[in-house]
Amino acid sequence: MIDVRNLTVRYGDTTVLHGVSLAVAEGESFALVGESGSGKSTILKALVGQVDDWQGQMTLAGHALQPGRRADLARQVQMVFQDPYGSLHPRRTVDDTLAEPLAIHGIKGRDARVLAMLDAVGLPRRFRFRLPHQLSGGQRQRVAIARALMLEPRVLLLDEPTSALDVSVQAEILNLLKGLRAEKGLTFLLVTHDLPVVSFLCDRLAVLRAGRVEEAAAVATLRAAGLRSAYGRELLERSGLV
Amino acid sequence: MSLLAVDNLRVTFPSDQGPVEVVRGLSFALGRERLGIVGESGSGKSMTGRAIMGLIGAPGRVTADRLEFEGRDLRNLPEWEFRKLRGARMSMVLQDPKFSLNPVIRIGDQIAEALEFHTQLSASARRVRVLEALEAVRIDDPERVARLYPHEVSGGMGQRVMIAMMVVMEPALMIADEPTSALDVSVRGQVLDIMDDLVRRRGMGLLLISHDLNMVARWCDRILVMYRGQIVEELGAGALNTAQHPYTLGLLASLPKLNEERATLPILDRAALDGFMAGAAR
């Protein structure tokens, strides 16, 4: 579903990704783990066409991507961002936010689709005409997930989707994501620094450091604290988990 | 005598629906130790820190039966008296150095500001103290860092600068509000180590406010767990497994583990919890 080969990204003279390769199968949930500056978010940006200057090969949902050209893949791939306070338009109601992608793509039956999506992400229907400031952080993240799913994409790119949330709310959103993936057969590419979240939500992971993949492993290896690379072990130790 | 004594602390803000109490009758004492306050957003943990520092302005209202710092009554202390305490005897470290440092003032000058305000030291004596403070937070090249602007340093270094700014006056009480939440895990340990070292060597009292139950449990001598403006439970160091209150237990259960095998994570049942709290209050 996602195939990245030898991806190199430079910002000016700085190389932020050095020939990164990874492959995610359809229906799989894959995690990119690393600290600030490791390049994990840059991979997501390159996949959705927010980085113009890259080298290598990328295939997304069967389409080969070209540098500098934004592929028309909105109905295949959508993204959920970290901060639900920053990613929703403050003066648009939940209904506006959810119906906009349908209007852009000329999809009919908006009313029924918005209501069905509110049910799917566990938001009460009475929230439909509320503004973001009338919602809690967890509710906003549900709206952001709902918006991403409105066009029924096959791939969801998740950039730290729960790290701005409280622990108890994080559990709710993680359960929601896991349930939606099973129900709709979605493919996840998750960026995070939180190893236990990977353990709960993902099948495989890649550890990134300074723009290089240090290690790729199955989640069973992570659960057994069996990461082999020096940096992988360091992350485990520093997270206080070993 | 304890460094800080708080008895029945209440913080209230007016709203359209009448006054809202965000801290509801908090009592605790702090000696020369590391005390953690843990809670989620809206639990009142940050408001507690601000109330102690006298940083809750109108229309907020702070009341307490007792609020004493080094034997001085902080209730109704005039602002000019408070200013002599803040930065000198009690200091605060905030979450994100990107927003708490002044972007247009050199780091050395920002640290020296507290000395300028609180002491009669000469410029050269101030400079010596600034460099010492930077060394105390393990900055290798203090002379160079003192000349830098905040955007020229990393997040971890920025947070160390914040701590240097706070320890330069050698306060007796340090309130750290989510000091490591904006930092990468690899830098977190370092910043906590430095604070730990300062508490031990200089005999400071530390109030660490955080949402991270595990981090606080590993690192503090005692933990207060807050929910809806109240302390629901007090726990000793590393004694998370002895937690009894349904809120603490709920929080611990909802946290994914490294060897996570559960199909779904348990959700905090807030309705049942509020019922429990109402029952306990009766």
Image (cartoon, rainbow, N blue to C red):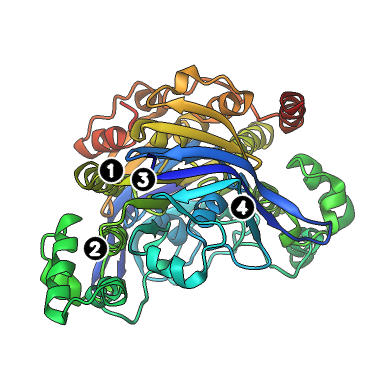
Secondary structure beneath dot 1 equals: helix
Quadrant of the snapshot with the C terminus of chain B: top right
Give the distance between the C-alpha atoms of the residues marked 1 and 3, in whole angstroms: 17 Å
Image quadrant occupied by the N terminus of chain B:
top left
Q: Which residue is mark 2?
A: B168
**Mark 2 burial class by Cα count in 10 Å: few <14, some 14-19, many 20+:** many
Looking at the picture, which amino acid does disc 3 mark?
Leu
Indicate which label's residue lies in the foreground, 1 or 4.
Answer: 1
Q: Is residue B152 left or right of residue B221?
A: left
Q: CA distance from mark 2 to mark 4?
A: 55 Å
Q: In the rendered image, which residue does mark 1 sit on? A: B189
Front in this rendered view, residue A72 or B7: B7
Q: Amino acid type of disc 4?
A: Gln
Pointers 2 and 4 in contact (C-beta within 8 Å): no
In front here: B242 or B268?
Answer: B242
In the rendered image, residues at marks 1 and 2 fall on the same chain:
yes
Chain letter, disc 1 residue? B
Q: Position of residue B108 (x, y in %)?
A: 22, 74
Which is more N-terminal, label 3 or label 2? Answer: 2
* Residue B40 drawn at (x, y percent): 57, 42
